[in-house]
Amino acid sequence: QVHLIESGGRLVQAGDSLRLSCWASGDSFREYAMGWFRQAPGKEREFVAAITWLGGRTHYADSVKGRFTISRDNAKSTVYLQMDSLTPADTATYYCAQERRPVQFDGGFDYFATELTYASWGQGTHVTVSS
C-alpha cells in the first residue's frame, strides 16, 4: 500500500500563489497517474487536476483551469499543484490520490475526475484563502 503525504497548505491572501506537494512511498510512482482533489467545508470532495504517468497529459476542473498547474517529478516520487490567483473559493483541504491500476493511457477527463479511479489517498493539506 502506497503512502501519500501532502504538504504546502497554509493561510494566504486572495491573489497569492501557493504550491502543494505530494510525495509517494515505494518505487512504482512513475507507473501511475496522479490526481488532486479538494473538499471545502460542508461540501463534497471534488476533482481539481490529474496528470498521466509520464506527465504528458493533464486535465483540470473548469474552476481552476488557467490558474492551477499540475506537474510531477518521477525521480522524486512527487506530484505538485501550483496554484495561482487564489480566491476564497479555493479554500479547502487538498488531497492527492494515486490511480488504482497503472493503466498507462490517457483515459480522458471523465476517467480522471472520478474518485473510483484512485485507490490511495493522502491525509490532506489545508489551504485557506482570505479576502
Image: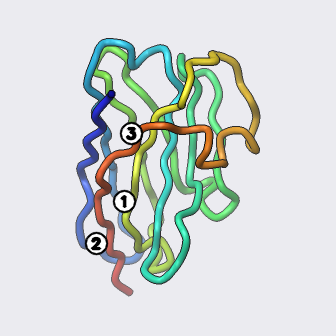
Q: Is residue 125 above or below residue 106?
A: below
Q: Earlier in the sequence, mark 1 or mark 3?
A: 1
Q: Quadrant of residue 117?
A: top right
Could you say which is closer to the camera, residue 86 or residue 124?
A: 124
Q: Nearer the viewer, residue 35 or 42?
A: 42
Crowd tier of the residue under label 1, counting other residues whose Cα lies within 10 Å: few below 14, some 14–19, many 20 or above: some
* Label located before the other in sequence (2 or 1): 2
Residue 1 vs residue 87, the one in the foreground: 1
The residue type indicated by label 3 comes to Tyr
User: Which mark is drawn over residue 17?
Assistant: 1
* Frontmost residue, 38 versus 102: 102
Mark 3 — residue?
80
Q: Is residue 60 left or right of residue 14?
A: right
Three-letter code, disc 2: Val
Q: Assess whether mark 3 and mark 1 are in contact (beta carbons under 8 angstroms).
A: no
Q: Identify the residue at horizontal 66%, vertical 48% (top origin).
A: 113
Q: Say what secondary structure mark 3 lies in.
A: strand
The mark that comes first in sequence, 3 or 2, is 2
Image coords of residue 37 (percent x, y): 50, 54
Disc 1 element:
loop
Q: Residue drawn 76% across and 44% down?
A: 110
Name the residue that disc number 2 marks: 12
- Which residue is painted at 61% across and 44% down in the image? 116
Q: Amino acid at mark 1?
A: Ser
**CB contact under 8 Å: marks 2 and 1:** yes
User: Where is residue 3 shown, x and y percent of the image?
Assistant: 28, 34
User: Between marks 2 and 1, how big is the CA–CA gap?
Assistant: 8 Å
| Position of residue 7 measured from the top left corner of the image (x, y, whole percent) | 24, 49
How far apart are labels 3 and 2 at the CA level?
18 Å
Estimate the spatial distance between the alpha carbons at disc 1 and disc 3, rounded to whole Å.
Answer: 13 Å
> Which residue lies at the image location 39% right of the left edge and 58% below the top edge?
94
Quadrant where the C terminus is found in the figure? bottom left
